[in-house]
Image: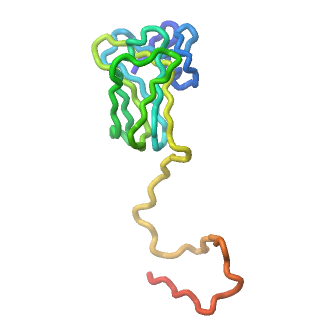
Amino acid sequence: SSDYQSGGGFSDVAVDGNTDGNWNNGSVTATYQSSKDPWWTVDLENGYLIESIAVWNRNAYSERLADFVLTISRDGVDVYTYTYPGIPAEAGTPNEIKLSSPVTGDKVKIQIFGEERILSLAEVQVFAFCGSEITPSPTSSPSIKPTALPTVSPTASPTAGPTASPTALPTV
């Protein structure tokens, strides 16, 4: 939502791989104190089948992250929402949210609600199934004519020679 401009606090440090949680080491995000309902989000750029998310808190002022709301969305639609109850563990211990069943999402958002709240994060790690990037959907209007060149598709046990009877031509 916004970055605290005095001494760091930039949003990108929540995805830099550093779970340190020490503000003085430049590894913690922060929003302005005057923020209403501050939030932080990461765009995964593609849909992934997410199974868990680890939220790393800072080592001081851990209460700032109390009752945070985690939202996973896909194409602008919220597909999963979880409210963390109470104050998360301080730096050094991940606050892991394991989804009861994986969901496909392309954005992850952390938000706290209220007037004059400060959102601080050390790191957010999104865990998805390996190779789970969602590929584009097939075309909605496939062609009905065969392509000019056949598709090469080797089989596990090819025939040694031609078959005794030809395969019937497809109907169009």
Residue 132 at what x, y percent from top left?
51, 47
Residue 4 at what x, y percent from top left?
45, 12
Q: Is residue 116 left or right of residue 55?
A: left
Residue occupying the point 70% across, 86% down: 161
When the figure is inspected, residue 137 is found, relative to residue 162, above or below; the finding is above
**The image quarter in which residue 151 lies:** bottom right
Residue 30 at what x, y percent from top left?
44, 14
Residue occupying the point 35% across, 19% down: 38
Q: Residue furthest right?
A: 160
When the figure is inspected, residue 92 is found, relative to residue 105, above or below; the finding is above
Residue occupying the point 67% across, 87% down: 162
When the figure is inspected, residue 133 is found, relative to residue 66, above or below; the finding is below
Depth order, front residue of 123/51: 51
Q: Residue furthest bottom?
A: 164
Residue 105 at what x, y percent from top left?
42, 40
Q: Quadrant of the N terminus?
A: top left
Residue occupying the point 62% across, 70% down: 153
Count of marks overlaid on the render: 0
Q: Is residue 36 left or right of residue 119?
A: left
Q: Quadrant of the C terminus?
A: bottom left
